[in-house]
Image (cartoon, rainbow, N blue to C red):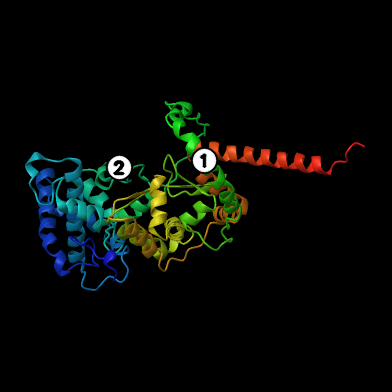
Amino acid sequence: MSMHRIPHMASLGPYHRGRKHLKPMEHHKERALYRILKRSGVSISDLDGSLKGVELDLRDSYDDLDTQWTSDKFLRMMLLDGCFMLELFRARLYPDTKDQDDPVFSRDSVVMGTVIRRDMLILENQIPLLVLRKLRGTEEKKEINDDTYLKELFQKALGLFDLPVNERNLHILDIYRKCLIMETAPMQQTTPSAQVSTKPVCTRCLSGLHVAGGKLKSMLTSIPTLDCRALCCRPIPKSHVRSAMRFHEAGVGFKKREPQNGLKITFENGVLTLPSILVDDHTAAIYKNILAFEIMHPKLWKDRKVVSYVGFMDSLVDTAEDVNLLCSRGIMMNMLGSDEEAAQVFNNLGVGIPYCPDREIDDPLQTYAASGWNAARAYLKRKYFRNPWAAVSLLAAIVLLDLTFIQSFFSVWDYMRPKDP
């Protein structure tokens, strides 16, 4: 089994129960149970009774459940795991000064970051959200029939907002995926006003006027050759290469989607707009598990938005140069040691993914990148319009060529026209 699908510190549910490196955390699960009992004043029988009524539903959440899980043993596991999760969330939401040195149930504990950020997002390390509903309801001496309280539980603990409440959420990984792909209602677009620099271009150029005389001649003589190279730029063959740098060279622009709107990707007017993504030590593990969830769940085969997104990003990111380009546009935030490591994350995520391109994006994107005119225009823009002097030199070269042509024309015309007798 992949290391991305094995918990580091805590087992949740039956599949990883009993692994040697996870046994130390079982003691803290017992502590979580007694913390809840002490704080709420309920009895163990109250907690057991709240789960007993939904035992069949909880069992149906697991495939191939081993026969060792008798009714008592299974419910005890659900009880301890549920109490453990609730106490971890509570420690993040309501930190107590008495617990500031607690190795597990404190806001700054190492366990908090590892278990909540990674172990709770492993596909085979889930417990049904029904367990949390029943236990939380018992603690508050009332029944909770929806997921509204998850906003309070998960917002600070997992950093999730706009949670899909009042839906049939299976487990925490399901909640995380829904938050990741959730698209907001379309907002009315307004045309932004042009941004004007506080320091006018003419003022910025004055400091460089004294070098113009010496450099203008060399700039002019070099421009015709470069222009010929721009006209000879090779476009990307349609449906052949998809890396970000190749698209950039073919004239495709890149822009971060603001505000973030799920994993929505659009291509309009030569600009590819992408959602931002943070790449850190947890990214590969989280996405591996979401991918496995989408591929394995029978009801998600028509809604594999994360599979589609990862497939697109895998094709877009091949090398460190691609990562550097996306970072420069604010699309990617790389918290790893190098751009090569970030590129490797996407290259590994794409292995074995049944990627089917979205034709509404892919076809116009490939057609645009296959245009030689777009490639030439992008080359000229990169070479001559990044700063005012480059633009001035290009215009001067065009004027010089026009004057040369006019002079040659009149010279030939003067030579060829009939002389008066």
Q: CA distance from mark 2 to mark 1?
A: 49 Å
Relative horizontal placement of residue 232, taking residue 333 as reference (left or right):
right
**Callouts 2 and 1 close, C-beta under 8 Å:** no
For label 2, the crowd category at 10 Å Cα-Cα, with few meaning under 14, some 14 to 19 and many 20 or more, is some
Which quadrant holds residue 54?
bottom left
Expressed as whole percent of the image width and height from the top left, the position of residue 68 reads 20, 73
Numbered-mark total: 2
Look at 57% across and 40% down and name the residue there.
394
Quadrant of the rendering where the C terminus is positioned? top right
SS label for mark 1 = loop
Which quadrant holds residue 5?
bottom left
Relative horizontal placement of residue 349, taking residue 67 as reference (left or right):
right
Q: Nearer the viewer, residue 319 or 36?
A: 319
Three-letter code, disc 1: Phe
Expressed as whole percent of the image width and height from the top left, the position of residue 347 reads 39, 63
Pointer 1 residue: 385
Residue 276's place in the image compared with 209, above or below, is below
Which of marks 1 and 2 precedes in the sequence? Answer: 2
Expressed as whole percent of the image width and height from the top left, the position of residue 353 reads 43, 66
Does the rendering let one see residue 162? yes
SS label for mark 2 = helix
Expressed as whole percent of the image width and height from the top left, the position of residue 23 reads 13, 65
Indicate which disc residue 244 carries. Answer: none
Look at 19% across and 67% down and name the residue there.
17
Three-letter code, disc 2: Lys
Does the rendering let one see residue 53? no
Look at 16% across and 54% down and name the residue there.
111
Look at 76% across and 39% down and name the residue there.
410
For label 1, the crowd category at 10 Å Cα-Cα, with few meaning under 14, some 14 to 19 and many 20 or more, is some
Pointer 2 residue: 151
